[in-house]
Image (tube, rainbow, N blue to C red):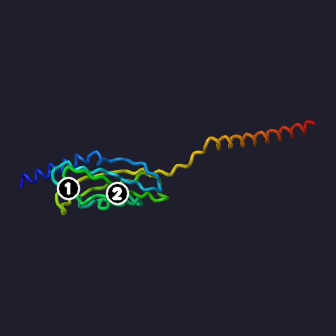
Amino acid sequence: MLKKASLFLSAFFVVLLGITPWAKADTFDVVIGTTFSFDVSLDNTGNPELFLNGSNFTIDSPLVLNDLLFVNFPPSVPADGIVNGTLFTVDLPTGLTPGLYNGSYSILGGFNSTDQFDLADLDFTINAIPASSPVPEPGTWVLLVTGLGTMGLIGYSRRRQASLGRAA
């Protein structure tokens, strides 16, 4: 029994170490009105097959998290195997107030199809930024400055003509 428990713990930590670079709190700049995908690589460096049995997640309202664990991944990661895919997406609705929104995601599983051990955790922050306005091209700036300069010259010449007309 002790050997089985130590085997489980060692494989569990190997899985956590394999996912550790992914499982850290990060801030992502995302444009409002778009969908952001979290693509991951699940690496099982241990000997037993690992079953992916569920997930838990939270996210600040009004963001929407679409859980894709059971859509894009097989039910298990084979021993010494790697699976890649989109773990979940987050929708940033149009009209969202710019700012920081927090979320977390956990993968649950273990060595059989009923285990609900916490295999990996991800805490993240989304920085919702407004869509950038288009930058005018240089030709637009030239046209604007030329037009304003012409208007200024017309105003100056009219004032000058008016002052010359009074002097005569």
> What residue lies at 38% left-to-right and 54% top-to-bottom?
37
- Return the mark for residue 88: 2
Q: Quadrant of the N terminus?
A: bottom left
Tag of residue 119:
none
Q: Where is residue 24 in the image (x, y as percent from the top left)?
A: 30, 47
User: Mark 2 or 1, which is nearer the eye?
Assistant: 1
Calculate the distance from the C-alpha at mark 2 to the C-alpha at mark 1: 20 Å
Q: Where is residue 131 in the image (x, y as percent from the top left)?
A: 51, 51
Q: Earlier in the sequence, mark 2 or mark 1?
A: 1
- Which structural element holds mark 2? strand
In the image, 61 versus 153, the foreground residue is 153
For the view shown, which residue lies furthest in the bottom direction? 114
Residue under pointer 1: 50
Amino acid carrying mark 1 in the image = Leu
Tell me the quadrant of the picture where the C terminus can be found. top right
Q: Residues within 10 Å of mark 2 (few under 14, many from 20)?
A: some
Percent coordinates x, y for residue 117 in the rendering: 20, 57
Left or right of residue 1, residue 158 in this image = right
Residue occupying the point 20% across, 54% down: 78
The residue located at (31%, 58%) in the rendering is 72
- Pointer 1: residues within 10 angstroms few (<14), some, or many (20+)? many
Residue drawn at 68 percent across, 43 percent down: 143
Amino acid found under the numbered disc labelled 2:
Phe
Label 1 sits on a secondary structure element that is strand
Q: Residue furthest right?
A: 168
Residue 150 vs residue 14, the one in the foreground: 14
Disc 2 + disc 1, Cβ < 8 Å: no
